[in-house]
Each structure stands twice: as structure tokens, then as C-alpha cells.
Amino acid sequence: MSRAFVNEDNAAAQADQPVERQVSAQPNYVTPSGLTQLQEKVAELQTLLGELNAQGDLADKQREADLQRDLRYFSQRLQSAQVVPPASSKKTVQIGSRVTFADEHNYEQTVQIVGEDQADATVGLINWASPLGRALLGAQLGDEVLWQRPAGDQLIEIIRIEPA
């Protein structure tokens, strides 16, 4: 028998296994609310897996594999979580700080610096390790910092810092 036929069988079996989610090499800093979100996500995935297994639906093996993959990922993120104390400074940007900055056209934007799993740029939650997060973290009220963006560097001024 040709080896090609043997490899086809292996390839079909592997196609059902989802690609593992990559865990960031960055420290897993989380805000207290970020920790709660991780805990809720793990609990939700455990519940969904339990319900799926209780149904005994053999046709939904792909969904089960996806849920197990996500549970492994979020469980690992929860175990590696390093909770940072709530931001308390109005002078220095910390993880958890809500920061308002202005660009050279005086366009103001407000974001909150959060952990990787909590980040959602569409609602202004910015990962501390992102280019914007790194530019802001540690900056002081009134500082001008360079935001190194893929679209080109931009100078921004910190005009307000609010603790979490």
C-alpha cells in the first residue's frame, strides 16, 4: 500500500482537532475586573462542555474539541494571572488607569490600560503591551509621548489620568 493513503487517514483525523490558541509570552497582568472575567469565562466553558457531554451528541465532536481547546487556553491564562493593584495615581499612568490624550490636532481620546485578555480597542480597553499601552504606561500628566504606530509615529500629550 502506498504511504500516501496512510497519511490521508492521519490528515483526516487531525483535521477535526482545532489549532491550539497561542499563549502570549508577556507577563499576564490583569486588573481585578480582568481576573473576574477570566474566572467567568472558565466557568462558562466548563458549563458548556458539561451540557454538551450530557447530551451525548456524537455528531458535535468538533464543537467539543473547540470548547476543550478554549478551556485549556483560558485555564492556563487564569493560572498565570498576576493581579495588579487598582490604579491609584492621578499623575502617572498605571495598568488600570483611564487616560485621556490629545494628538497634534487636539483630537482627544480616552482609553483604559488593561491586561491582554481584557483588551477590546472598540470600547477603549487597551492592552498594556500594545504600542499605545507601552507609550502611555509610566507617562505622567502633561507628558508628550511617542506612540509608535504601524501607520506612522504620532506624538500625543497626556491631558488626564483617572484611577480605576
Image (cartoon, rainbow, N blue to C red):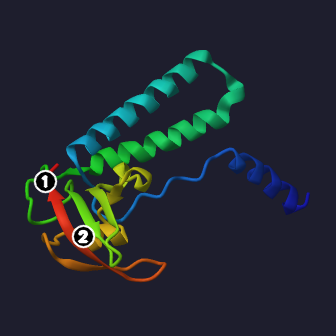
Task: Using the rendered view, name the quadrant where residue 28 is placed.
Answer: bottom left
Residue at image x 66%, y 37%?
62
Q: CA distance from mark 1 to mark 2?
A: 14 Å
Disc 2 on helix, strand or loop? helix
Residue at screen point 35% across, 33% down = 40
**Left or right: where 106 falls relative to 59:** left
Q: Quadrant of residue 93?
A: bottom left
Q: Which mark is residue 87?
A: 1
Q: How many marks?
A: 2
> Label 1: how many residues lie within 10 Å, few (<14), some (14-19) or many (20+)?
some
Q: Residues within 10 Å of mark 2 (few under 14, many from 20)?
A: many
Quadrant of the drawing holding the N terminus: bottom right
Q: Mark 1 belongs to which amino acid?
A: Ala
Q: Is residue 90 above or below residue 66?
A: below
The residue at the point 66 percent across, 33 percent down is: 61
Q: Position of residue 41 (x, y in %)?
A: 39, 36
Task: Decide: is 145 above or below 126.
Answer: below
**Identity, as a three-letter code, of the amino acid under mark 2:** Leu
Q: Residue 13 appears at what percent x and percent y?
A: 72, 46
Above or below 154: residue 102: above
Local secondary structure at mark 1: loop
Percent position of residue 9, x then y = 80, 50
First in sequence: mark 1 vs mark 2: 1
Residue 106: numbered disc: none
User: Label 2 near label 1: C-beta < 8 Å?
Assistant: no
**Residue 132: horizontal and vertical position, in percent?**
33, 69
